[in-house]
Image (cartoon, rainbow, N blue to C red):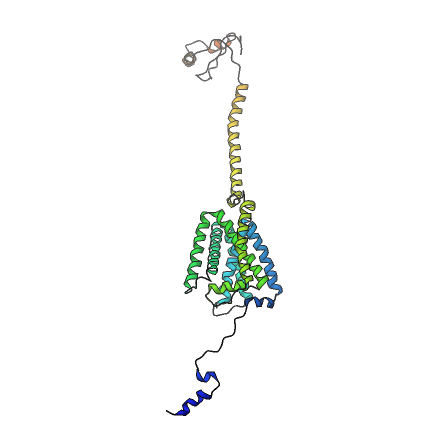
Amino acid sequence: MDPTLLLPVAVSLDPRGFNQGAAEPTEPALDPCSLLSERHYEVVPCVVCALCCIFGVAYCCFGYRCFKAIMFLSGLLFGSAVIFLLCYKERILDTQLSLEVSAGIALGIGVLCGLVTMLVHSVGLFLTGLLLGLLVATAGLVATEPFYELPNGWVPAGALLGLSLLGAVLALRWQKVLTVVSTAVFGAAVLTLCLDYAVENLALGHHVYDRLRLAPSSLLCWCGWAVLATWPALALMGILLQWKVTAEGFSHTDVVLNRRQKQLQLLRIRQREAKKRQCQAPHEGSYRNKAGAIKRCAGDVLAPSYIQSLRDRQHLGTGTSLSNLSTSAHTTVDLDYDSGSTVPLTTPQGCL
């Protein structure tokens, strides 16, 4: 064995010459809380965050009370978000759309979706339950991160799809309860994101997004976990506030049927008035006929058979002249009167 082969190993001071496969020492992990001093805020995101705070308070505190407005906003946000992601992330007709064009298309389609969810309440309730299921699934995936590592992307996709469909079906069955819970949870989530932007510049939002798509993400600071803990607290407060104060004694079905009930009530009132007029008309006519009728006097009456015999004799010319009968004192015979009527013969004594 050649002794010169051992020379580089004996005299070399570079450790990489001894172990070429050895990894370089890694840099120490950065403390996530040290990034809090590097926050930068811009005007447009701050304005958007302020608007989101207003919408979050409206959702959390007055979600069921402002039923139509909430249905419109839910459809607007959901439709705009989905269309924006499709237009901005994907190529449409072999053309990459710009940010402004994608936002305009998403806003227009979002308005149409909002009108549909506001006018068709079953669609709005379905979307409300769908949103609740997505939020619950997201919270579950984030909460189980320290204890369970997701093996593949089918687990979060299945959890999101299954819980969202379950929430949508339950919202159609128990409309008021699920609407109150969904609006409170969604409003609390929006307020939590606004607080996260103010504290950590959306570090919690990026962490949740990376968790859903199984991408490596940085650790959260204790401030991030504190912000995340405000979500269930705000949601619980919103549910209690709506159930005891704003949503008490209010039902969205009354709002839906309000115009129809008014029209039906007006129609019923008109029908009743028409029936009353129809019932009063014959009574008034009979009363007038009775008031204008000839007074009948007590006395003998001619039988219908006798009147018929007089008519027969008139036609035959062999009976007593009708003129003699008509000239008799205080005697009245009406041959044109109905055969079923009675005719007074005596003097008008004891008239009624």
Q: Residue reaching furthest right? A: 43
Against 81, is 66 above or below?
above
- In the image, 148 versus 10, the foreground residue is 10
Count of numbered labels shown in the rendering: 0
Residue drawn at point x = 48 percent, y = 85 percent: 14
Question: Toward the viewer: 165 or 31?
Answer: 31
Q: Position of residue 108 (x, y in %)?
A: 54, 59
Q: Where the N terminus falls, by quadrant?
A: bottom left
One can see residue 39 in this view: no
- Above or below — where is 126 with respect to 296? below
Judge from the rendering whether residue 228 lies leftward or rightward of residue 10; answer left or right: right
Q: Tell me which residue sits at (61%, 63%) in the image.
A: 44
- Please tell me which residue lies in front, 289 or 215: 215
Tell me where residue 178 appears, x and y as whole percent. 48, 49
Q: In this view, does 124 lie above or below 335?
A: below
* Residue found farthest to the left: 1
Q: Is residue 325 visible?
A: yes
Nearest to the observer: residue 91 or residue 125: 125
Location of residue 303 in the rendering, given as x and y in whole percent from the top left corner: 43, 12
Q: Which residue shows up at 42% across the image and 61% down it?
A: 155
Q: State the image quarter where residue 152 is shown.
A: bottom left
x and y percent of residue 161 in the render? Answer: 43, 58
